[in-house]
Image (cartoon, rainbow, N blue to C red):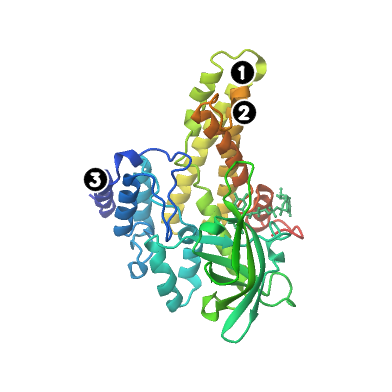
Amino acid sequence: MSDLDGFRQEVRTWLEANCPISLRTPTPDGELIWGGSDVNFTFDDQRLWFDRMRDKNWFCPTWSTEYGGGGLSSKENSVLESEMRRLKCRPPQINLGIWMLGPVLLAHASERQKQQFLQPMTRGEVRWCQGFSEPNAGSDLASIRTSAVDMGDHYLVNGSKIWTSYGDKSDWMYALVRTDPKAPKHQGISLLLLDMHSEGVKAAPIDLISGKSSFCEVFFDNVRVPKENLIGEINDGWKLAKELLQHERSAMSKFGEFQLPTHFDLMSLINDYMPEPRCKSEAALFDKAVTAEMEERAYNLTVQRLGHEMQAGQNCFALMSIMKLVHTEQEKTKFELLLDAMGYRALGWEDNNFTEQEQAINRSWLNSFSQTIAGGSSEVQLNVIAKRILQLPENKGTS
Ligand SMILES: Cc1cc2nc3c(=O)[nH]c(=O)nc-3n(C[C@H](O)[C@H](O)[C@H](O)COP(=O)(O)OP(=O)(O)OC[C@H]3O[C@@H](n4cnc5c(N)ncnc54)[C@H](O)[C@@H]3O)c2cc1C
């Protein structure tokens, strides 16, 4: 038996003994656990799973043990991921800090910053939000205007961010700020870590059509941020932002993996609403559902191939824009097909005449649409793919 086979056996045994049976199902809407200073568990098994994975140091399996990670190699991590998939274990927590900021800190932060920020992340104690987008700076992110002025021992931050997911529930923000207003727009930007409890920070939720309000507008009014919270070099934040966005896209290319319904439930769900196709367009829906399922299988195989390539030492980082684009578009297509099959039943909205599943599908469709915008819209991904992967001539004005 190879070392890796032995490790797989070990992981399998541990997961079977420690992942509660109730958490070996896709995560229904509303049962996601967000790590942070105020974690909301809806039932005890969630806390148990959270605590066990944290104590195993598997919130951040590949990070070095020095910073509270699991110290696993990328091959071992692939084994862990595949065994979790096999058992259908839910992720023990969702944490933007771990997915997006953490890898950037590991690569670019000072030793003191790593000690300060990574350990609490690996224990799921801090909830992070992303302060990138601003009014008039979404796709064209380099146009951000929130300023951070050097005041000697601290920066004074003024301005506002928009579409900040869970800004009102977060402990800290990683923010892009303008530190040199005279420099060309891609220069003069820095990456700053900001305590959301600082004086002068106000997070105001924005109401959404989906009925939930995960978005916030965040205002900064003379917020003092210690200089030691600057990551990397001053005015060199654009490079870090691009790196961070690729980590975001990588994480987003896996969203939906544990959510219901999957592409493989499509046919039977459509069948529930249309046992017998009554016309050509209904028959065509079945064809589209088969295509969607095949495309999902192809996507999953591509994910596996990328995993093998990464294990073999290839750098697949740039390809995450493709994965994010394809995955989020496929998720959207899945829900659009379901809505087509459901007919008027797709109108269900907090109404007893509609089943919980119908209402959940309706919400998930809206959410799937938003995922094609978050982390850079599909059009922007196409621009990034054209420029950075296919090396086509630059289209002026894209991010
Ligand atoms: C669910 C969700 C969560 C989000 N969470 C956060 C968060 O936590 N923090 C944060 O900072 N931001 C967040 N965002 C904001 C997100 O990053 C922006 O919405 C996104 O980058 C698009 O920017 P915009 O909304 O300003 O649209 P715009 O940039 O105004 O774009 C409008 C339309 O024009 C298209 N377009 C723009 N430029 C080009 C171009 N050059 N070529 C082709 N088409 C183009 C876009 O594709 C889009 O269809 C979130 C968004 C969503 C939907």
Q: Is residue 201 something one can see in this rendering?
A: yes
> What's the CA distance linking mark 3 and mark 2?
42 Å
Q: Is residue 209 above or below residue 195?
A: above
> What's the CA distance linking mark 3 and mark 1?
46 Å
Residue 375 is left or right of residue 267, and the answer is right
Residue type at mark 3? Ala
* Numbered circle sitting on residue 215: none
Residue type at mark 2? Leu
Q: Name the residue tied to disc 3.
A: 17
Circle 3: element type? helix
The residue positioned 69% from the left and 65% from the top of the image is: 142
Residue type at mark 1? Ala
* Numbered circle sitting on residue 347: 2
Q: Name the residue tied to disc 1.
A: 283
The residue positioned 58% from the left and 33% from the top of the image is: 362
**Ligand 1 under 8 Å from disc 2 Cβ:** no
